[in-house]
Image: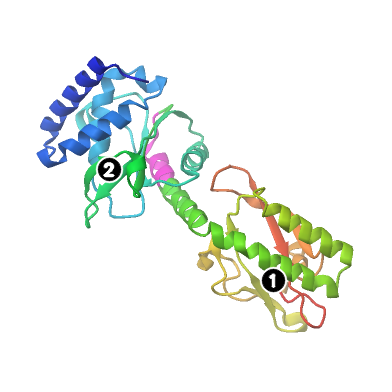
Amino acid sequence: MVMDSVRVDDLLAEVGRLADDRGIDEGDREALGAFARNFASRVPPVIEHDEATIPARIVTMFQFVLTRDQPAKVRVFTPTQESHGYEVGASVVEVCTPDSPFLLDSITNEVERHDVKVAGVVHPVVGAERDDGGRLHAIRHARHTITRESFEHYQLESKLDPETIEAVETGITRVLGDVRATVADFHQMRAKIDRMVELTRIGGSAYSQAEVEEGVALLQWLDDDNFVFLGYREYRLIGEGDDVAVEVVPGTGLGILSDEARSTVRKAVPLADLPPDRAARYTEGDLVVVTKTNRRSPVHRSAKMDYVGVRIMGPDGRTAG
């Protein structure tokens, strides 16, 4: 949607009137005006169809993004005339977070995981300047600042019940944490390919040269911009004989695997207590293991993730991790 100057003037006048009604401080009006222009320039047809609701959407969302003292703010609600100044017969998701890759598709995937469809998205990315308390005091063009924020307004296709609202809000908050971890650790994860290649070559003491070369070629192919790295973690085998157990190597987790407390083997678990197929994976098989996980990716694409593992060989020729 691209508004002509008359419609923009009318929109800003109505936004100003609503700001008066809502008691928005005069000191926040310049930022509100900049936000209104950014929002209005990105309205998709499904929201443009309800053009009369746009000023109220702007003012309501501006009040939401005005303060942010956490990595991300998320809310899911069904707007009402009384509370928000507009109604659309459907629920809305709003997000305020530092700009990052993978935001829109990751959030949309999480919403749709709850059998809810997204009807339209308004997604201004702005240069947001905040004070030490997280209060927004200026909005600049995104190219003119290093602190870019993503303000996202999703209109859904239906009204959500309270339980689903809570589940969607919790899920999006979790997904945004996974996105932050993935992006923050991307370069470290990519650098781990060198370690995996080194371990694969060391495996030549127990595997054929052909298998080593194939494994190295695969890992180098992954590193050639053919893979989105989501998580990395190392595991080690401890004990002897029937008492062999597997555990996470502390401090090795990156990306979505950085929180080692979420691992089922954060403390040593005897292989005898694991399902036979999983236990066998730790002790025997190919030098470089490629398979699919049961878990779907929370970041970028809603598909089962690829698992790529390199066997760490001990000096005795047996798997050590």
Element class at badge 2: helix
What kind of residue is marked 1? Asp
Q: Nearer the viewer, residue 80 or 315?
A: 315
Magenta stretch bounds = 159-169
Alpha-carbon distance for marks 1 and 2?
A: 49 Å
Give neighbour class at mark 1: few <14, some 14-19, many 20+ (Cα, 10 Å): few
What kind of residue is marked 2? Val
Q: Are marks 1 and 2 in contact (CB under 8 Å)?
A: no
Is residue 296 in view? yes
Using the image, determine if residue 171 lies above or below residue 87. Answer: below
| Left or right relative to 201: residue 111 | left
Is residue 165 on the magenta stretch? yes
Which image quarter: residue 84?
top left
Q: Main secondary structure of the magenta part?
A: helix
Which image quarter: residue 168?
top left
- Disc 2: which residue: 65
Q: Which quadrant, please, contains the C terminus? A: bottom right
Q: Which mark is residue 98?
A: none
| Left or right relative to 108: residue 154 | left
Give neighbour class at mark 2: few <14, some 14-19, many 20+ (Cα, 10 Å): many
| Left or right relative to 171: residue 235 | right
x 55%, y 44%: residue: 300
Q: Nearer the viewer, residue 115 or 86?
A: 86
Element class at badge 1: helix
- Disc 1: which residue: 273
Using the image, determine if residue 234 lies above or below residue 128. Answer: below
Counting residues from the start of the chain, the first of labels 1 and 2 encountered is: 2
Using the image, determine if residue 123 lies above or below residue 17. Answer: below
Could you say where residue 3 lies in the image, as x and y percent from the top left? 31, 19
